[in-house]
Amino acid sequence: MAARQSVEHAAIGPRSHPKPEKTRLKRSGVDSAAVRETRVAAEAHDVWTSGICGAVGRTPMIRLRHLSEATGCEILGKAEFLNPGGSVKDRAALGMIVDAERSGRLVAGGTIVEGTAGNTGIGLALLGLARGYKARIVVPETVSIEKITLLRALGVDVRTVPQVPYSNPGNYQHVARKLAEEEPGAWWANQFDNTANREAHFRTTGPEIWEQTQGRLSAFVAAIGSGGTIAGVGRYLKERDRSVRVVCADPHGAAMWSWIKHGHTRFTEGDSVAEGIGQNRVTRNLADAPIDDAVRVGDRVAVEMLYHLLRREGLSVGLSAAINVCAAVKVARESGRGGTVVTVLCDGGARYASTLFNPDWLARHDLSPRAPGLEFMEQL
Ligand SMILES: Cc1ncc(COP(=O)(O)O)c(C=O)c1O
């Protein structure tokens, strides 16, 4: 298990605990009950975190039993939905906040502004509120009602805007930038082009995966939203072992498969209901990312996987996690038996109760799961 060190702690160096009192007390002849109590307190100190920010990261790695047995490879999912804000984006949020504090762009009492498909906003808001900031979040109106409800419950000023391409000035990212420019004391997190995002994954997610697999992994698979996860983890793993394959899982409608396979972003056919992924441009986080290959995954097979993970593995996750696992299975099959493929379980299913876990919604989108077993894997 990786050393219990959060993004923030990794950024500012190891926590300096006061030396346990044990030795001094023993020497001074204090009775053994007091010594025991002090020892318990000292040990507790090691597991306490300094507020919610210290609880980010160090997530478990979960072996997906049925898929591992079916492929003859170890298929492992990094349980990022267990972060305090419920997603992998807590790492990027904390990394960007700490970086902005250090550079003086985020000052006491300031406002964090971001355009997001929801999870980054939740991470920024939760961690930011705990550090005394306000938050203003712009989301496309296609974002799940559960995420918007949570943001509003946090007291965040949430603005919803029509879902329009990045080239349109009304795109949520541009609206967020403008809001930040107009407000004194506001800081635009800019997750897509702020490389403190991928640095957080380089410093934490990558080392955790390396330690949890004891350096024995053949591939790392991740879908791309900002690209922070795949770029940061990919760079760390490649620095440790160049033979680890880094593979992008791309939903239909995104351009990353096209970019990685053909060097341009022109092929974007299809569409996906997955939130948080589906990128059409090469963000600054993605520039120079060491990505070897890409796999396209359709929503229909991903929903089958979503329900397999829920009902056979007891894992309640969102669609980007299911797309990641589909791609991990494909990579495992292609690489042959005996490998270890790690992927990311990006967020939890409760965030999509009204959509992915609502039979009426699924039927309306012609996505109702059909296969009782693993037959759906033939569609990969
Ligand atoms: C649910 C979900 N999965 C995956 C991602 C992609 O992560 P990254 O932005 O690091 O590429 C995001 C990003 O917002 C997300 O919200």
Image (tube, rainbow, N blue to C red):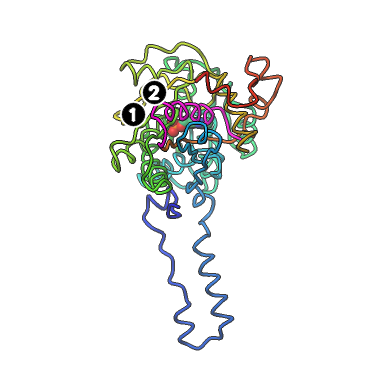
Horizontal side, residue 156 vs residue 68: left or right: right
Q: Position of residue 210 (x, y in %)?
A: 38, 45
Residue 188 seen in render? no
Q: Position of residue 96 (x, y in %)?
A: 41, 40
Q: How many marks?
A: 2
Magenta stretch in the rendered image = 315-339
Residue matched to label 1: 291
Q: Magenta-highlighted stretch: main secondary structure? A: helix
- For residue 196, above or below residue 305: below
Residue 354 seen in render? yes
249 and 371: which one is in front?
371
Determine the residue positioned at 59% across, 33% down.
Answer: 309
Determine the residue positioned at 56% across, 40% down.
Answer: 86
Q: Residue type at mark 1?
A: Ile
Query: Residue 275: which disc?
Result: none
Which element carries disc 2, helix, strand or loop?
strand
> Is residue 207 within the magenta segment?
no
Horizontal side, residue 245 vs residue 346: left or right: left
In the image, the residue with mark 2 has its CB under 8 Å from the nearest atom of ligand 1: no
Quadrant location of residue 158?
A: top right
Distance, label 2 to label 1, CA atoms, is 8 Å
Query: Residue 294: which disc?
Result: 2
In the image, the residue with mark 1 has its CB under 8 Å from the nearest atom of ligand 1: no
Horizontal side, residue 113 vs residue 157: left or right: left
Determine whether label 2 and label 1 are within 8 Å by CB.
Answer: yes
- For residue 324, above or below residue 232: above
Determine the residue positioned at 59% across, 24% down.
Answer: 304
Which element carries disc 1, helix, strand or loop?
loop
Determine the residue positioned at 52% across, 73% down.
Answer: 39
- For residue 185, above or below residue 115: below
Q: Residue type at mark 2?
A: Ala
The residue carrying pointer 2 sits among few (fewer than 14), some (14 to 19) or many (20 or more) residues within 10 Å by Cα, namely many
